[in-house]
Image: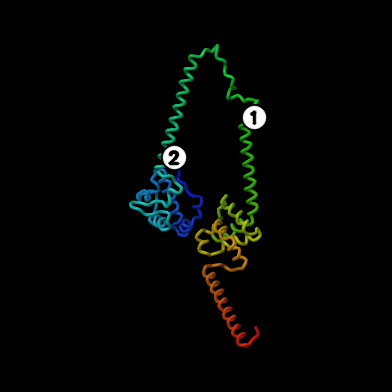
Amino acid sequence: MTWFKVDDGFYDHPKVAELLSKRSGKGAIATWTRCGSWCSKQERDGFVPESVAKQLGATPVEISELVRVGLWTRVKDGYVFHDWHDCNPSSDELQVRRNKTKDRVSAWRGKQSGNGVTTALHHVVTNDSVTPPPTRPVPTRPDPSRPDQREESMSALGSATAIATRKAKASKAETGDTWQAYADAYRARYGEAPVRNAKVSGQLAQLLKRISADEAPHVARHYVSSSNARYVASGHSTGMLLADAEKLRTEWATGRTGTAFAARQADKRVGRGAEYQELLDRLHAEDVAAGRVAQ
C-alpha cells in the first residue's frame, strides 16, 4: 500500500497562498489532493491524465490555477505534479521494495519450514527416558528472579513522555503573550484563528531569542498589520515573522516601514551629503590659501 506524502510546509507555501487569494483556490487545493492520492495508488509518478482529472471533479478554472502557480505542469494528455519525487517514491523504487519484502518473507518461511522438519525428526528419535526435560521456564509464567522488562520499558516511555510534555508546556507558557498578540491580529485580518502546531511554537521560541519578550507581542501585531507583498503572499506565516524579526522590530520601534524604495532614497541622501561636505572642505581650503580665513 502506498501513501500520498505532503510536505509539512505546504499549508503556508507561497504557491498555496497565491491559490487561496483566488475564489477557486480551495477547490484547486482539493483537486490537487485527490489527484495526488490517485497518482500514489496507481503509481503514475505524479502524472495525472486529463480524463482522470475531470473524473475526479477538477474544473478548467482549478486546473488553470494549479498550472499558473506552478503546482502542476501541463504535458501531453495531462498534467504532472511539480517535484513529485521530492516527497513520493517512484514506481521503480516501490517495485524494488516489494521484491525485497517478498524475498525476505520467502527466506523467513523457508527457515520456519526447516525448523519444523528438524523438530519433528527430533521428537521421533529422542528417547524420553534419557533426554532430560527442558529447564527453561514456561514463557507464559513470570520468573520472579528477573525484572519485568515490560514494566521497565513502559516506565521509561512514561518518563520520556512526561519530560516532553513539560517542555512543550513551558515553551507555550514562554511564548503565550506573543502568540496571543499574533492570533488576535490574525483573526482581525483574516477572520479566522491561525494554526498552532509544534513548528509554529518552535518558531515563536526562536523569535524570543532574537528580540525581547516584552517587545515580541508588539512586533507580532505590527507584522500581521503589514501589507508588505511578501508577507501577504505567505499569509503572514510565523516563518516569515521569524525570518525578518530584526527588521520588523526596527519598523515597529521607529514607526517606519522599510521598503526597497526607501532604502534607495536613503542611499541617495547619504551620497549627496558626502558630496556637499567635500565641496565645503574644498572651499575652506581655498579660503585658507588666499588668507581670507585662518586655518
- Which of the labelled discs sits on residue 275, or is there none? none
Question: What amino acid type is highlighted by mark number 1?
Answer: Pro
Could you say whether the residue bearing mark 1 is in a helix, strand or loop? loop
* Percent of width and height locating residue 122: 49, 17
The residue shown at (45%, 59%) is: 22
Q: Which residue is mark 1?
A: 147
The first of marks 2 and 1 along the sequence is 2
Within 10 Å of disc 1 (Cα), the crowding (few <14, some 14-19, many 20+) is: few
Q: Which residue is mark 2?
A: 1
The residue shown at (47%, 20%) is: 118
Give whichever of 220, 289 is nearer the camera: 289
- Quarter the C terminus occupies: bottom right
* Number of marks in picture: 2
Within 10 Å of disc 2 (Cα), the crowding (few <14, some 14-19, many 20+) is: few
Q: Nearer the viewer, mark 2 or mark 1?
A: 1
Give above or below for 145 relative to 31.
above
Residue 288 occupies quadrant:
bottom right
* Percent of width and height locating residue 267: 54, 72
Outermost residue toward the left in this view: 76
Give above or below for 106 relative to 230.
above
- Quarter the N terminus occupies: top left
Question: What amino acid type is highlighted by mark number 2?
Answer: Met
Could you say whether the residue bearing mark 2 is in a helix, strand or loop? loop
Q: CA distance from mark 2 to mark 1?
A: 39 Å
* Percent of width and height locating residue 85: 43, 48
